Amino acid sequence: MGPRTGHFRTAILLLPVLCFLAAHLAAQQDDFLQTTPHVVATTPTLDQRFVPPGRTTIQVQFDRPMSQTSWSWCGSGPRYPEIVDAPRFVNETTAELPVLLKPEHTYALSINCGAGRGFVSADGVPAQPTPMRFTTGSSLADMVQTDSRNLRAWQEFRTLFATRYSHLERTGFDWQTHLDGARGWMLSPADPEEFAVRLAILMEPAQDVHLYLSLPDDTKVPTHRRRARWNGNDDAIRRAFADYTIHNDNIASGRQGDVGYLAIASWSLTDEQLAVVDKLLGEFAGSRRALVLDVRGNGGGDETQARRVAGWFLDEPRLYARNRTRDPEQPEGWSPMRTRWVQPRGPEHHYGGRVFVLQGPVCLSSNEAFLMMMRQAPRATSLGEPSGGSSGNPRRYELPNGLQVVLPSWQSFLPDGTPIEGTGVPPQEEVTGSFAADDPVLARALELAAGE
């Protein structure tokens, strides 16, 4: 089903996963939510199971009066419900979508999304995008037969999850009871895609962004939608630095007197982008007394790239992390504890000034490793908030029904043995505040740099 346009400006757009990502990016700041319409109730409820199939309506209630002439029920494909009548508002705060729901099926849609903002308040403010997912129950008139491949996939997954998943015991959740009780529900889907969606719902208690399913066409089916507030302000950054330049999707730079600024948004850089980073650091090394290194928006990537950049700030090899890997062949189910080191790049790739590393809750995975590396740099100070606490070194496993399950394989630790998962890397100086109009983390870094 493609986009629809007309008098009501209905937007039925994109795949549900993309709408989930748009919702994640939209919900960044508490201050933003105070001025933006948002959903207070849905029918069915979010992630509700065993919803009665058949002809019904999906309802959504907002926290304030809404425009009665526009909406965006976003979604497409087999996870989007069949619409049987025109969308409408039943009162000033509640909209409904008449649909026909199939039995034993998981549905996903979003109320507003990145490309559809038809739900607006009476004074014209678009509502916060909100993902919605639910699963219908069985119909006695249309029972679904168990696919033998799903049975084998379920058995294989149970073994892999118990023996290969590195964070099995982190939350204290009773996985055996949880999965035993879901066996019948997991064996009834008629296709692998439905199997994947249901398994993703079952895995939500792990609260692990590195644990997910992959369909045969490589579509990712996440098990956890992490909502993290970015602790920065783009306008404040632009105001603070002369010659502020966005070099590409991942790199920006600027200067304030003899203080340089470098933002790196990912450790999935191309060779050309890595060369830009080296060039900028070389220029800063020759002309800047201090450097603000901003990785608050960096969610991870390739740890070898992070080591390459961190090597600019070291004068000798440093231990920055420890890890152990899940291994059912070992007596206790784990490999021996191993160490990870970062090496200096050498005299031609060395920055000797003060470095102020900006971090926050969006920082994950290989970027958390980078934060640990920078804690070993003798002239570096980290500022902001603790990182997100998710580092799993995920590995893929094939299931008999054509799906892949991606399982985190290791546990990562600070050099002193403190686990990263669920805890994160703390800054050396915690800085919080309101980011609606300013950037207190950046302001504190510039204050410290001025005192050098």
Image (tube, rainbow, N blue to C red):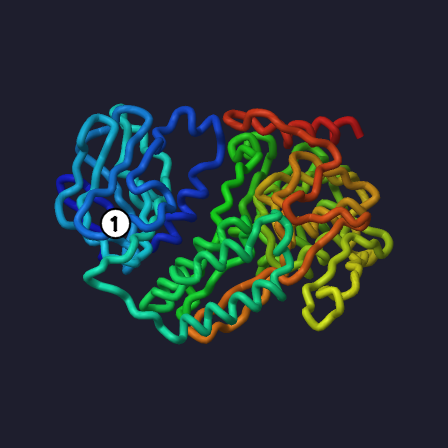
* Residue 275 seen from this side: no
| Snapshot quadrant of residue 305 | bottom right
Task: Give x and y (percent) for residue 173.
Answer: 58, 49
Q: Is residue 231 above or below residue 319?
A: above
Residue drawn at 42 percent across, 39 percent down: 26
* 35 or 151, nearer to the observer: 151
Tag 1: residue type?
Pro
| Snapshot quadrant of residue 257 | top right
* 412 or 433, nearer to the observer: 412
Q: Is residue 39 above or below residue 207?
A: above
| Snapshot quadrant of residue 119 | top left
Report the label total. 1
* 347 or 116, nearer to the observer: 116
Task: Give x and y (percent) for residue 151.
Answer: 43, 71
Residue drawn at 80 percent across, 30 percent down: 452
Image quadrant holding the N terminus, namely bottom left
Decide: few, some or many residues near mark 1? Use Cα within 10 Å; few <14, some 14-19, many ≥20: some
Residue drawn at 72 percent across, 57 percent down: 307
- Which residue is under mark 1? 52
Q: Secondary structure at mark 1?
A: loop
- On screen, residue 430 versus residue 437, left or right, reads right
Residue drawn at 38 percent across, 46 percent down: 47
Task: Give x and y (percent) for residue 325.
Answer: 70, 63
- On screen, residue 28 versus residue 349, left or right, reads left
